[in-house]
Amino acid sequence: MSYSVGEVADLAGVTVRTLHHYDEIGLLSPGDRTAGGYRRYDEADLERLERVLFYRELGFPLEEIATILAGSTHPSSHLRWQHRLLRHRIARLQEMVGLIEKEMEANEMGISLTPEERFEIFGDFVPEDYYQEVQERWGDTDAYKQSQRRVTAYTKEDWVQLKTKSSEIERQFADAMRAGVAANSDEAMGLAEKHRQP
């Protein structure tokens, strides 16, 4: 069974011109030609074309693909390597999706800081990790909507001031606890109110 250049182009979703170019550079030369000089491709040619197109999809330049294909003719070698390359690409894409989702959540939460500013302010704490829980628990409340409107206007200085204030209140809570202040005392209630205030 052999195929014309037009049939192969249709099967592979490439142009006839692409197949001619692959032939000219020696990347994929047809296994046969008709008496009139027309290219005829056999099954082995189609398998090689499949490998070429797969490596192209992975971003390899044609010269490098030619070198790769010259190094091993066994299909299983290429399949194993392509499988590894794809797994690596998938992992990288999933990592990128995760970063984009975090950035989307940060935008929705009104946190528009550079990565350096985010690290400087939040350290290892990642606010977006709690976004889904916050949405589920308070997302439809007026208080949450009001908070979101306020937060979207925060600058880096506002976040720094908020972090400083929060750290100070946490220190006061710890001091009160170490001093044995009762949870229902006026002092403890005053600290709780201070913590509650925006």
Image (tube, helix red, strand yellow):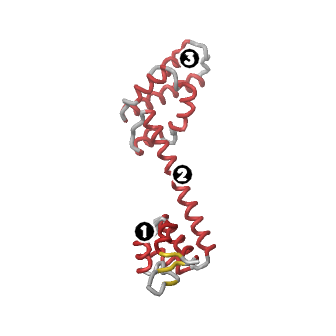
**Residue hosting label 1:** 15
Residue type at tag 3 = Ala
Quadrant holding the N terminus: bottom right
Residue type at tag 2 = Gln
The 10 Å Cα crowd at callout 2, few under 14, some 14 to 19, many 20 or more, is few
In the visual, does 118 lie left or right of 175? left
Q: Nearer the viewer, mark 2 or mark 3?
A: 2
Going 44% across and 76% down the picture, which residue do you hit?
22
The x and y percentages for residue 127 are 50, 36
As helix, strand or loop, the secondary structure at mark 3 comes to: helix
Quadrant for residue 184, please give it.
top right
Residue type at tag 1 = Thr
Going 39% across and 30% down the picture, which residue do you hit?
152
In space, the residues marked 2 and 1 are separated at their CA atoms by: 32 Å
Query: Closest to the observer: 42 or 88?
Result: 42
Considering every residue shown, the one lying at the far top of the view is 186
In space, the residues marked 1 and 3 are separated at their CA atoms by: 76 Å
**Residue hosting label 2:** 94
In the visual, does 191 lie left or right of 25? right
The x and y percentages for residue 153 are 36, 29
In space, the residues marked 2 and 3 are separated at their CA atoms by: 46 Å
> Which mark is on residue 188?
3
The 10 Å Cα crowd at callout 3, few under 14, some 14 to 19, many 20 or more, is some
Quadrant for residue 109, please give it.
top left
Going 45% across and 81% down the picture, which residue do you hit?
38
Query: Is 182 situated above or below 79?
Result: above
Query: Closest to the observer: 139 or 82?
Result: 82
As helix, strand or loop, the secondary structure at mark 1 comes to: loop
Choose the circle earlier in sequence order: 1 or 3. 1
Considering every residue shown, the one lying at the far right of the view is 76
Quadrant for residue 2, please give it.
bottom right
